[in-house]
Image: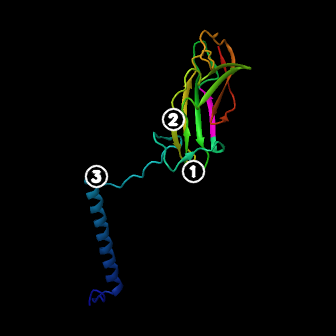
Amino acid sequence: MSVLRPTGPEPAAVYWRRRAVVLLALVVVVVLVVVIVRALTGGGPAEPAADPAPSESTQTEEPDAGAVACDPANLTIQLSADATTYPEGAAPLFTATMTNSGTTPCLLDAGDAQRQIVVTSGTDRIWASTDCGGGEALQLLLGAGQADQRQTQWDRTRSDEACSTGLPAPGAGTYQAVLTLDGVSTDPVVFTLG
């Protein structure tokens, strides 16, 4: 067979090199044709799916049967305010961040009735987000390491657990806010009202 044993005036290595060049050129042409056809038909290479943000959680109406409630030991909560000083009339906005620091997904009730922010001035309890209304449950399925954020605004009024009316308005001064959820509390966030 002359294909496997080239014959001619040139050495066999010359023929083998020519065959390799022709074969390589053929492969390049085939690849180019495939790329052009895919580009024209919209079947370009698929882009990898973006990883979900770690701060996202899944709100669920019916909890996953396999999921268990978050262990308070594996729950990290933080509270922050949008400012340290508020001029007269400005309402503080608090952000609660709840993170599943465990290694498995878990369910967390982060509803208004469970997520309590209490504002105090010294030993005086000024306001709590759970006063005057129970709020609804909000079951969140948090993956391992996932966080969820919820915001609560304080309208600078005074409240109590009995939902009394006619309470004196808080004056200018230094206040602190603490978040409590599932038996876990944050360090106080200190701020000033003008």
Q: Mark 1 is on which residue type?
A: Thr
Quarter of the image where one finds residue 179: top right
* Tag 3 near tag 2, CB within 8 Å: no
Magenta segment's dominant SS is: strand
27 relative to 91 in the view: left or right: left
Say which of marks 2 and 1 sits in front: 2
Q: Which residue is mark 3?
A: 42
| Label 2 Cα crowd, 10 Å radius (few <14 / some 14-19 / many 20+) | some
Q: Write down the residue under mark 2.
A: 138
Which residue type does callout 3 highlight? Answer: Gly
Q: Which mark is residue 104?
A: 1
Q: Left of 136 or right of it: where is 123?
A: right
Local packing at callout 1 (Cα closer than 10 Å; few below 14, some 14-19, many 20+) is some
**Separation (CA) of disc 1 from disc 3:** 40 Å
**Residue 141 drawn at (x, y percent):** 51, 43
Residue for point 30% across, 54% down:
43
Of 16 and 94, nearer the camera is 94
Left or right: where 107 falls relative to 167: left
Q: Amino acid at mark 2?
A: Leu
Q: State the residue at coordinates (48%, 47%).
A: 64
Camera-side residue of 150 and 30: 150
Stretch in magenta: 76-81
Q: Secondary structure at mark 3?
A: loop
Q: Which quadrant of the view contains residue 116?
A: top right
Quadrant showing the N terminus: bottom left
Q: Earlier in the sequence, mark 2 or mark 1?
A: 1
Compared with residue 171, is residue 112 higher up or lower down, i.e. above or below?
below
CA separation in Å, label 2 and label 1: 20 Å
Compared to residue 152, the image places residue 146 above or below, namely below
